[in-house]
Image (cartoon, helix red, strand yellow):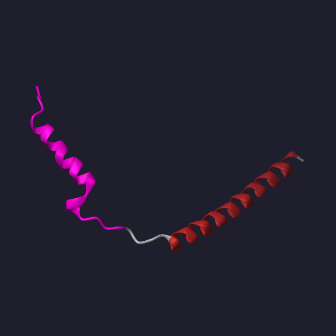
Amino acid sequence: MEDLTLALITLTSFVLLFVVAIFADRAGMETSETTAEPVLVPVDESPVLARSVSGTSHIDTADVA
C-alpha cells in the first residue's frame, strides 16, 4: 500500500512540475514579444567607461611595496 501511495505522489509531482513548466514557458514567450529593442549608447557617453577611466589615475600613484 505504501508503494502505491509513493508512486501516486511521485506521478502527481511530475505532472504538476510539467504543468508549471508549460505556463512558465508561455509567460516567457509573451514577455519576449513585448520587449523593446536595446538602446545603444555611444562609448564616449558611457557612465561605466567614465568611471573606469577616472579610476585608473589612482592606480598609477598607488604605493606598491
Toward the top, the furthest residue is 65
Q: Residue at x 69, y 58 (%)?
A: 17
Residue 6: % across, % down: 81, 49
Residue 57: % across, % down: 12, 41
Residue range (magenta): 39-65
Q: Residue at x 21, y 48 (%)?
A: 52
Q: Residue at x 21, y 51 (%)?
A: 50
Q: Quadrant of residue 25?
A: bottom right
Residue 19: % across, % down: 70, 63
Horizontal side, residue 2 vs residue 29: left or right: right
Relative to 56, is 7 above or below? below
Give the camera-side residue of 19 and 27: 27
Give the camera-side residue of 17 and 60: 60
Q: Quadrant of residue 45?
A: bottom left
Magenta-drawn stretch, dominant element (helix, strand or loop): helix
Toward the bottom, the furthest residue is 33
Q: Quadrant of residue 30?
A: bottom right
In which quadrant will I find the C terminus?
top left
Horizontal side, residue 24 vs residue 62: left or right: right
Relative to 17, is 37 above or below? below
Q: How many marks?
A: 0
Horizontal side, residue 32 vs residue 27: left or right: left
Toward the right, the furthest residue is 1
51 is within the stretch colored magenta: yes
Horizontal side, residue 28 vs residue 12: left or right: left
10 is within the stretch colored magenta: no
Relative to 8, is 56 above or below? above
